[in-house]
Image (cartoon, rainbow, N blue to C red):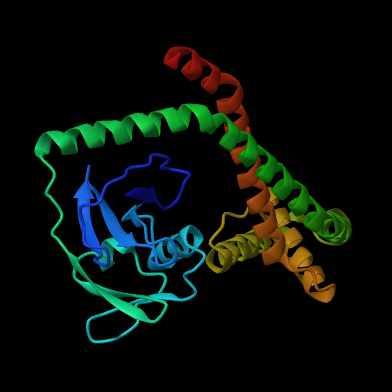
C-alpha cells in the first residue's frame, strides 16, 4: 500500500494488502484522516492523507488525478446524488458518508467518527501552536516591518504628490486673504483715528468740553454695545487676534469657493499624511531599537 497525496508534506511509502481491492475506507491516524482507495490504472492501493482544515474537495480530487493520470473525471456527491462544491472543506465532508465518482464509477464511502483527543494532547497542541507563533514572530517580524516601512514611504510620497497642487492653490488663497485682512485692520485703525481727530476738533475748536462730554460718553457706551453684540453672534470674546482670525477665515473660504478649492479633501489628505508619518516613525523606532533587543533576548 502506497501513501499518496501532496509530496510536500509526506514522503513515506507503506506496502500491504489488508483491504478489499475496490473498497474505499476512511481511517484516522495521529488525528489526521487517511482515505484509502485503489487507483484504477495501476490497481494499487493508496492512502491519501487529508489536512482537514486546509484541504478542500477540489484539492483532494486534484491529488487523485495527479497520482493516477488514468483518472479522467472525478467528483464527490452526496447519498442523494447532489454534487458537492470543490470549495467545501474536507473536514465538513468527512462528517458523514458520501460517494466518490471516478471515471463514472461510484464508490460508497463510510466515514467513522473521529477519535476525541485527550486533554494532555490538547495541552501539548496548544503549547506547540504558541511555540510556532513565537518563532514565526521572531523570524518574520523584522521582514514584515521593513515591508510596512516601504509601504508607508510609498503612501507618503503618493499623498505628497496629491497635496502639491493643492498647496500651491492654498498658498495663493492665503496670500490674498492675508492682504484683505490686513487692509481691513488698517481701515479700522484709520476710522478710529478719524473719530479721535473729529472729537478733538469739536472739543477745542468748535464746542467746549461741557458739550462734548456726554457725546463721548454715549459713543463709548455704543462701542460697548457693539462688542457685546459681537459676543452674542460669534460666541467669542472680542479680542483683536480672534477678530483677525475670524475675518481671515471668512476671506479664505470665500476665495476657496471661487477657485473651486476643496477644503475638506485637503484636510483629509493632510490628516492621512500626518497619520502615515507617525506610523512610519513608530515602525522605524521599533525596527532600529526594539527588535535587536528582542532578538538577542530570544537567542
> Which quadrant holds residue 30?
top left
Q: Pick whichever, 174 or 11, lies toward us.
A: 11
- Residue drawn 28% across the image and 58% down it: 36
Q: Pick whichever, 258 or 49, lies toward us.
A: 49
Image quarter in which the C terminus is found: top left
**Does residue 128 appear in the picture of this structure?**
yes
> Which quadrant holds residue 236?
bottom right
> Which x, y percent locates residue 244?
73, 54
Number of on-image labels: 0
Query: Considering only vertical position in the picture, is 291 above or below 30?
Result: above
Q: Pick whichever, 297 or 186, lies toward us.
A: 297
Query: Considering only vertical position in the picture, is 298 above or below 3?
Result: above
> Which x, y percent locates residue 154?
73, 47
> Which x, y percent locates residue 65?
48, 65
- Residue drawn 21% across the image and 32% down it: 124
Please give left or right for residue 168 compared with residue 264 in the image: right
Please give left or right for residue 216 compared with residue 100 in the image: right
Q: Pick whichever, 167 or 171, lies toward us.
A: 167
> Which x, y percent locates residue 224?
60, 60
Please give left or right for residue 121 compared with residue 9 in the image: left
> Which quadrant holds residue 11?
top left
**Does residue 199 appear in the picture of this structure?**
no
Please give left or right for residue 257 compared with residue 205 in the image: left
- Residue drawn 42% across the image and 77% down it: 103
Amino acid at each position: 500500500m502506497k501513501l499518496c497525496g501532496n509530496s510536500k508534506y509526506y514522503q513515506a511509502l507503506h506496502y500491504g494488502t489488508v483491504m478489499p481491492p475496490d473498497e474505499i475506507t476512511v481511517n484516522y491516524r495521529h488525528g489526521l484522516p487517511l482515505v484509502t482507495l485503489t487507483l484504477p490504472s495501476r490497481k494499487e492501493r493508496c492512502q491519501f492523507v487529508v489536512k482537514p482544515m486546509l484541504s478542500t474537495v477540489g484539492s483532494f480530487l486534484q491529488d487523485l488525478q495527479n497520482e493516477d493520470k488514468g483518472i479522467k473525471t472525478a467528483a464527490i456527491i452526496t447519498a442523494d446524488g447532489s454534487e458537492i462544491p470543490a470549495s467545501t472543506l474536507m473536514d465538513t465532508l468527512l462528517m458523514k458518508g458520501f460517494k466518490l465518482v471516478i471515471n463514472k464509477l461510484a464508490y460508497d464511502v463510510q466515514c467513522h467518527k473521529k477519535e476525541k483527543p485527550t486533554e494532555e494532547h490538547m495541552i501539548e497542541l496548544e503549547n506547540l501552536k504558541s511555540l510556532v507563533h513565537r518563532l514565526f514572530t521572531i523570524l518574520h517580524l523584522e521582514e514584515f516591518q521593513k515591508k510596512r516601512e516601504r509601504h508607508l514611504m510609498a503612501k507618503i510620497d503618493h499623498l505628497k504628490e496629491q497635496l502639491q497642487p493643492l498647496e500651491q492653490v492654498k498658498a495663493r488663497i492665503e496670500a490674498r486673504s492675508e492682504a484683505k485682512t490686513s487692509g481691513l485692520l488698517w481701515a479700522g485703525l484709520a476710522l478710529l483715528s478719524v473719530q479721535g481727530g473729529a472729537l478733538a476738533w469739536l472739543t477745542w475748536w468748535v464746542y467746549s468740553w461741557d458739550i462734548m462730554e456726554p457725546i463721548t460718553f454715549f459713543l463709548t457706551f455704543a462701542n460697548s454695545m457693539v462688542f457685546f453684540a459681537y459676543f452674542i453672534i460669534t460666541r467669542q470674546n472680542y479680542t483683536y487676534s480672534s477678530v483677525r482670525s475670524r475675518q481671515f477665515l471668512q476671506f479664505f473660504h470665500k476665495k476657496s469657493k471661487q477657485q473651486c478649492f476643496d477644503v475638506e479633501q485637503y484636510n483629509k489628505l493632510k490628516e492621512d499624511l500626518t497619520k502615515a508619518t507617525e506610523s512610519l516613525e513608530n515602525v522605524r523606532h521599533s525596527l532600529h531599537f526594539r527588535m535587536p533587543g528582542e532578538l538577542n533576548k530570544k537567542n
